């Protein structure tokens, strides 16, 4: 019965309006895209060929890969990689927010200092910055607290304070602060100026406007590029091997230099990087959903509640 009804609808002549047939009543049919079909088939064949070639490759030695995957040394290397990334990102975001606000300041001095910082650490290769930070003691053998050109109240050798892990965290944080500050600055500038003016007109202080109106919207815009930076930083931590930090990659290298099981251990490192990056990608998606853009009405309610007795 349904088939007959559908056939009648298809064969039903279109209505005529102003001497012309109504296009909405004309039967439609999806066109078959030959290039799309060809591209899909070719992609499927190539993907299958690559996967079969990799998983059947004798050099991978899957039993060895499985044996090392949860080895204590490997897990410690993964943990070290995550720790360096987390600490560097946290410190880098603090620097980024500070530098971004300085770039937006009315003070020419603050703007100039922020621009110089951004220029310097964006221009300097990360590996060079890492090695310079690690060799900080060559420039300042001793650090302390005291009066400039006067007595020192406290001092200590730089080599005792600056461990390799701390040097890595500082180097990555300085680099991240330069890049993320530009992301945050652009995100803040993308918030409509009228919202800030409306909040000020309702009696909110400048600091409260930034904290409750501007920054929440800027964060939503900044989340995707900042998470991309986080993922790049996680992968970039592999260069800490140059200063002797036993992260995931350096641990893998130290093992295969003894066992000569190079291919299986490189696969182990790849698997762990894929796992951590996949987790970060899910976290990014969750945060993007949580900070989804709100409608103008909800924004207006938030401004009014903050202006008239809302929580600070």
Image (spheres, rainbow, N blue to C red):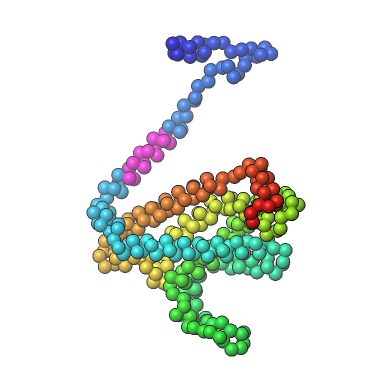
Q: Work out whether residue 121 can be spotted.
A: yes
At x 68% / y 45%, what residue is drawn? Answer: 300
* Residue found at the far front of this picture: 309
Within the image, what quadrant is residue 116 found in?
bottom right
**Up-down relation of residue 262 to residue 21 (above or below):** below
At x 56% / y 63%, what residue is drawn? Answer: 94
Q: Work out whether residue 192 can be spotted.
A: no
In the rendered image, residue 219, in percent from the top left (x then y), is placed at 58, 53
At x 48% / y 83%, what residue is drawn? Answer: 157
For the N terminus, the image quarter is top left
In the rendered image, residue 284, in percent from the top left (x then y), is placed at 49, 50
**Up-down relation of residue 27 to residue 244 (above or below):** above
- Count the numbered circles shown: 0
In the rendered image, residue 311, in percent from the top left (x then y), is placed at 63, 54
At x 72% / y 63%, what residue is drawn? Answer: 106
In the rendered image, residue 238, in percent from the top left (x then y), is placed at 41, 63
The foreground one among 191 and 203 is: 203
Q: Magenta segment, which residues?
A: 38-51
Within the image, what quadrant is residue 76 found in?
bottom left
For the C terminus, the image quarter is bottom right
The foreground one among 143 and 44 is: 143
Dominant secondary structure (helix, strand or loop) of the stretch shown in magenta:
helix
Relative horizontal placement of residue 144, taking residue 56 as reference (left or right) = right
Magenta stretch encompasses residue 45: yes
Magenta stretch encompasses residue 254: no
Within the image, what quadrant is residue 209 found in?
bottom right
Relative horizontal placement of residue 4, taking residue 305 as reference (left or right) = left
């Amino acid at each position: 019965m349904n088939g007959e009804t559908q056939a009648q609808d298809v064969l039903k002549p279109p209505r005529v309006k102003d001497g012309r047939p109504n296009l909405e009543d004309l039967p439609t049919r999806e066109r078959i895209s030959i290039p799309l079909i060809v591209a899909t088939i070719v992609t499927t064949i190539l993907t299958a060929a690559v996967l079969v070639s990799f998983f059947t490759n004798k050099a991978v030695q899957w039993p060895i890969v499985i044996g090392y995957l949860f080895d204590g040394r490997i897990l410690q290397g993964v943990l070290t990689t995550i720790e360096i990334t987390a600490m560097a990102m946290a410190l880098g975001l603090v620097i980024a927010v500070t530098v971004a606000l300085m770039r937006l300041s009315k003070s020419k001095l603050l703007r100039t200092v922020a621009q110089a910082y951004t220029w310097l650490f964006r221009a300097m290769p990360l590996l060079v910055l890492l090695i310079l930070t690690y060799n900080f003691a060559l420039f300042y053998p001793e650090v302390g607290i005291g009066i400039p050109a006067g007595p020192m109240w406290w001092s200590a050798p730089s080599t005792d304070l600056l461990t390799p892990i701390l040097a890595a965290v500082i180097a990555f944080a300085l680099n991240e602060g330069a890049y993320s500050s530009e992301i945050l600055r652009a995100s803040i500038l993308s918030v409509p100026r009228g919202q800030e003016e409306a909040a000020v007109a309702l009696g909110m202080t400048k600091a409260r406007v930034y904290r409750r109106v501007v920054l929440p919207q800027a964060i939503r815009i900044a989340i995707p590029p900042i998470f991309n930076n986080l993922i790049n930083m996680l992968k970039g931590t592999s260069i800490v091997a140059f200063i002797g930090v036993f992260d995931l990659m350096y641990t893998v290298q130290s093992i295969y230099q003894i066992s000569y099981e190079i291919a299986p251990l490189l696969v182990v490192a790849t698997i762990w990087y894929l796992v951590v990056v996949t987790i970060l990608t899910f976290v990014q998606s969750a945060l993007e959903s949580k900070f989804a853009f709100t409608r103008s009405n909800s924004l207006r309610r938030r401004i009014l509640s903050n202006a008239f007795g809302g929580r600070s």
